[in-house]
Image (cartoon, rainbow, N blue to C red):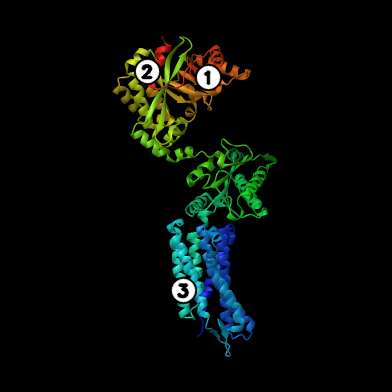
Amino acid sequence: MQKILYFDYCAFIVLCIILVIVILKGMTKGRLNKAYFYLLICAFFATYFDIAAVTFDVLYFKSPILRYGSHTLYLFMHTLSALLYVYYIICLTDTFFLFKKSKLRTISFLAPFVVLCILYVENFFSKKLFYIDDSLDYVRGQYFIVLYVLTLYYVIYGFYYLVKFRRVFDWGRFIPLLSDILFLIVALLIQYKHPNLLVEMFASAIGLIFIQMMVQRPEEIIDSDTNLNKLSLFVEDLKRSFINKKHEEIVMFNIVNYKVIRDMLGYNETKLLKRNIGAKILEVIESSKMNAEVYYADAGRYRIVMSIDNQGEDTKVLAEKINEEIKKDYIFNNMNINIIACTCIVNFPEDIDNVDDVIKFGDNIGVKEYTGEVLYATELFKKDEYNIMRDIDEILENAVNERKFKVVYQPIYSVETQKFSRAEALVRLNDEKYGNISPAVFIPVAEKNGTINKIGEIVMEEVCKFVSSEEFRDSELEYIEVNLSIMQCMNRNLVTSLMNILSKYDVKPKYINLEITETATASVQDIVYDNINKLWLKGFRFSLDDFGTGYSNIARLSQLPFSIIKFDRTLTMIGNNDKLNIIIKNLMRAFKETNAKIVVEGIEDKVTLDQFTSLGCDYIQGFYFSKPLPLDDFVSFIKEKNM
């Protein structure tokens, strides 16, 4: 019965196309890509030798070497394809480390292949697998069924592995892989029952198309700028390692001055720089004869996951080599571009046991800890801080709903009257689980998720309760300062909301001074101007807070009704800096000529107090007089000090 080669021809063409795509896209690096590439190569040669063997049979070639050789090579590649398919699934599940722990697992994986290889060699003498009879026809031998049984064993092995490690796959990968296995089983049974229908390699080729499109997904896992793995794949691989309880050593590499370099070089040259750095990292790994997966996490951040074969001391050596190599100057238009690189080693999950925390930690290395040396997460990672950031949205939502925010008051000293004539209201948050959470942590998050408006209302209500009380009237305080976030200023309902709260407690606007930071004024929009002007007309006063920390636009400042300028604590560190002393003195004089009052924040000692008093500031705020106090303590403080 003549065999039909059309399916093999189609398979051969399909495999050629896939191979070209894989090579052109550079998807031959990394364990998973290599496993898929080897599987493609093996399927390609299996199809080629199948076509050759059948062609020799049809033409009745008399050469036994050609005929036995082509059939044996086809069967060998056929078996190797099954083995490599299982190996590919093992790579997908990232469980190869389990085989190093269990000899039985390794034997169960390799033994059938070894048995078949022995049978192929032995067949040249025994003719038990197949033989060429006297009529020059190809005939299956009595052991031929063993080949199908052991090939089916690998297919079932792959199926078992898929099901066992189902949790490491999303449905987009699991379904194509499962369908592929079922497709192969059907093809095996058809070809065994009907030897003239050569459908096995066609089924393999179709399966590899599905894998290429739905499992490999190059456009989703490869960064086009660097040709490295994307951050999404890094996250996916870490989650898989966590599920499999696999230890990973990660080298995190951040370009600390990436934004400066990008602004200087522009998009195209920065893209080239990123690709060169990626190539250098791969070169160092290769020259060190190590195995690792390299990922690009955007914004000049690279991640290297070491293979289990070379962890420990090898990781430290590699990290140091990369750190030194990348810090070398980059030449652009005859300029030396200095790359400030921060490198850190993370043991996962020992150092950090949560994938989200690994990502957040990696984003922030180098921001505070840059030393030029290789850093270690064991020394830097503060678990509670990252747990807070992970849960902060929920913490804020609960705090708003249950009104857990507390208001404290810091007294402000009048140089002229030598009394405490006003105070700043500051918000505090104490969580049952994490304790006191700094405003520097929760305020930026609240501004992003919108809870800042609710927090602002809670603070204003607490302040108005105090202002409407006997304690406030007895204290002879002029007003209370309340911070106003730029996000609150952009709220179209701000004026109505504040006036409703003041009306509820019968408080006049003149007793409330609203503080807006210098940084916030740098990006004001029309709605902000409208809100500030409307509130000013209602009788509210305004302060420019944290002056000296931003990049003020003088024209914008002149358009806003600030009656008070609060110098930030960073300007109090004058010391013996005569130039800074002159600048501050002249700034104060300039603001006073606009009838603005000057408050200096962050005064902590008598020397600094005397220094700024002599420069002509009007008010002093800082720990020298008092830290922020709960309401009862604040009232007692004012009574005692203003007697």
Residue at image coords 59%, 74%: 117
For disc 2, the marked residue is 511
State the image coordinates of residue 27 (x, y, percent, origin top left): 57, 58
Provide the secondary structure element on which disc 2 rests: helix
- Tag 3: Cα neighbours inside 10 Å, few (<14), some, or many (≥20)? many
Provide the secondary structure element on which disc 1 rests: loop
Provide the secondary structure element on which disc 3 rests: helix
Q: Earlier in the sequence, mark 3 or mark 1?
A: 3
Q: Earlier in the sequence, mark 1 or mark 2?
A: 2
State the image coordinates of residue 288 (x, y, percent, origin top left): 67, 53
| Tag of residue 604 | 1
For disc 3, the marked residue is 187
Q: Are marks 3 and 2 in contact (CB under 8 Å)?
A: no
- Tag 1: Cα neighbours inside 10 Å, few (<14), some, or many (≥20)? some
Give left or right: position of 564 versus 460: right
The kind of residue tagged 3 is Ala
Can residue 105 be seen here? The reply is: yes
Which of discs 1 and 2 lies nearer the camera? The answer is 1
Query: Which residue is nearer to you in this view: 271 or 33?
Result: 33
Residue at image coords 49%, 71%: 153
State the image coordinates of residue 272 (x, y, percent, origin top left): 62, 48
The kind of residue tagged 1 is Glu
> Disc 3 to disc 2, how far (Cα)?
84 Å
Residue at image coords 41%, 31%: 430
State the image coordinates of residue 259 (x, y, percent, origin top left): 57, 39
> Disc 1 to disc 2, how far (Cα)?
27 Å
The kind of residue tagged 2 is Tyr
- Tag 2: Cα neighbours inside 10 Å, few (<14), some, or many (≥20)? many
Farthest-out residue, right: 334
